[in-house]
Image (cartoon, rainbow, N blue to C red):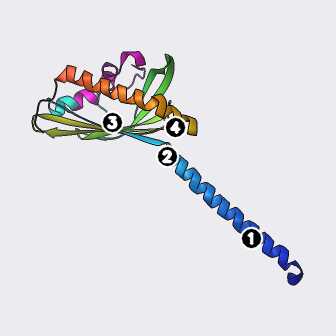
Amino acid sequence: AWAENGGSARYLVKRKCLALNLMYVLGLLQQNLQTMAAHSIYKVQRLPVSLDQAWEFFSNPANLQAITPPDMGFKVISKYHGPLMYAGQIIEYKVKPLLGIPIYWMTEITQVKDKQYFIDEQRFGPYSLWHHQHHFKAIPGGVEMTDIIHYKNPLGFIGRIANSLFIKKKLEGIFQYRFQKAEELFGAWKGWY
């Protein structure tokens, strides 16, 4: 019986191998597309204030509105923050990033190391991924703050096009505004470091 069906058995094995190879290639392609969809922003700012002052201000969700462009319509709407930031803290916002349309955004503070860093991650909102690291370091004459953001837009290819056309520019503008507001609040860096 094997000899009689040998041709069809070989055909089935070849088809199965071809299907497995196709699945492998599609998996690699999907992985590649997902990787391409991730974007990052890296910003460093130095201010002539102590580490304690910088940490106290920037780790307090109540101060976010003061350093966000007014046209964003940014408002913290959650009520139960507590006096200090902590891992597991949920912060809810309303924001109008595009055409004045309000969007609900929820982030969680996932990690906190006092006066060194904290990380917020989106739990619900406009991105398919939002991971924002806030690092603080005392330097001679002040503090150095580093923001590292990784984000993905929804809608795959359309999200990547939207990022190129306006989303990345909007995020860069928000951080430029924060940079300027921080200088207004704490003074411009004049140090040599």
Q: Residue 36 — which label? A: 2
Q: Are marks 3 and 1 in contact (CB under 8 Å)?
A: no
- Left or right: residue 193 compared with residue 171: left
Direction from residue 110 to residue 1 in the image, left or right: right
Give amino acid for label 4.
Arg
Q: For mark 1, what is the residue?
A: 14
Helix, strand or loop status at disc 3: loop
| Circle 2: element type | helix
Q: CA distance from mark 4 to mark 1?
A: 37 Å
Image coordinates for residue 120, horizontal then vertical, percent: 38, 36
User: Magenta includes 28?
Assistant: no
Pointer 2 and pointer 4: residues touching (CB < 8 Å)? yes
Whole-percent x and y of residue 15? 75, 66
Q: Can you identify the residue that label 4 sits on?
A: 160
- Give the Cα distance between marks 2 and 1: 33 Å
Badge 1 density bin: few <14, some 14–19, many ≥20, Cα 10 Å: few
Quarter of the image where the C terminus is located: top left
User: In this rendering, is residue 85 above or below 94?
Assistant: below
Residue 72 quadrant:
top left
Q: Earlier in the sequence, mark 2 or mark 1?
A: 1
Q: Which residue: 42% across, 23% down?
A: 78
Q: Secondary structure at mark 4?
A: helix
Q: Which residue does the numbered mark 3 point to in the structure image?
A: 86
Residue visible at 24% across and 36% down?
145
Q: Give whichever of discs 2 and 3 has the lower sequence position.
A: 2
Label located before the other in sequence (3 or 4)? 3
